[in-house]
Image: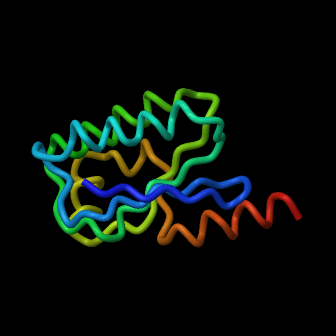
Amino acid sequence: MKLTVQNHGEVTIATLEETRLDAALSVRFKEGMREVAESDVDNVVLDLSQVMFMDSSGLGAVVAVMKLMGREKMFQIAGLTPAVDKVFKLTRMDSVFKILDTAEDALNEAKQSAG
């Protein structure tokens, strides 16, 4: 499983560089994101733009990451492909998470808030 983490000042972008987030990857994904959650960051964007398929295990892993972040950290999701977006909408998780079109949108929002 490949997870790339980049710090952009106020925003940390974690990009899952996999085409699937399913039962086979969900445990390793949570472990990788736990490191991000336990680091000294306050605003994390999970970029799922490369993920073409997500099952219930993958969605559960994303929810687990949100819980790891706690209430004091901002956790957003960006770049949902149509199939993954459908999973979020069918489960109504689109009302639980702040979902952005792209990770760049999060960077732009942070710049506007700071400036």
Q: Quadrant of residue 93?
A: top left
- What residue is shown at x 42% (from left), y 47% (from top)? 95
Up the image or down, 14 lies above or below 35; here it is below
The image's colouring method is rainbow
x and y, in percent, of residue 27 in the image? 22, 36
Viewer-side residue, 46 vs 101: 46
Q: Which residue is at the far left?
A: 24
Q: Which residue is drawn at the image coordinates 67% and 61% (left, top)?
A: 8
- Left/right of residue 66 with respect to residue 90 in the rendered view: right
Quadrant position of the C terminus in the picture: bottom right
In the image, residue 55 sits, relative to residue 48, either above or below, namely above
Q: Quadrant of residue 96?
A: top left
User: How far across and down, in percent of the image, does residue 67 sit?
Assistant: 43, 28
State how many labels appear: 0
Question: Is 21 left, or right, of 36 in this rendering?
Answer: left
Give how far across and how far down residue 9 sits, in percent. Answer: 73, 57
| Horizontal relation, residue 93 to residue 87: left or right | right
Task: Name the residue located 30 percent from the left edge and 70 percent from the top edge.
Answer: 50
Closer to the camera, 97 or 11? Answer: 11
Q: Position of residue 82 (x, y in %)?
A: 26, 72
Going 11% across and 43% down the picture, which residue do you hit?
23
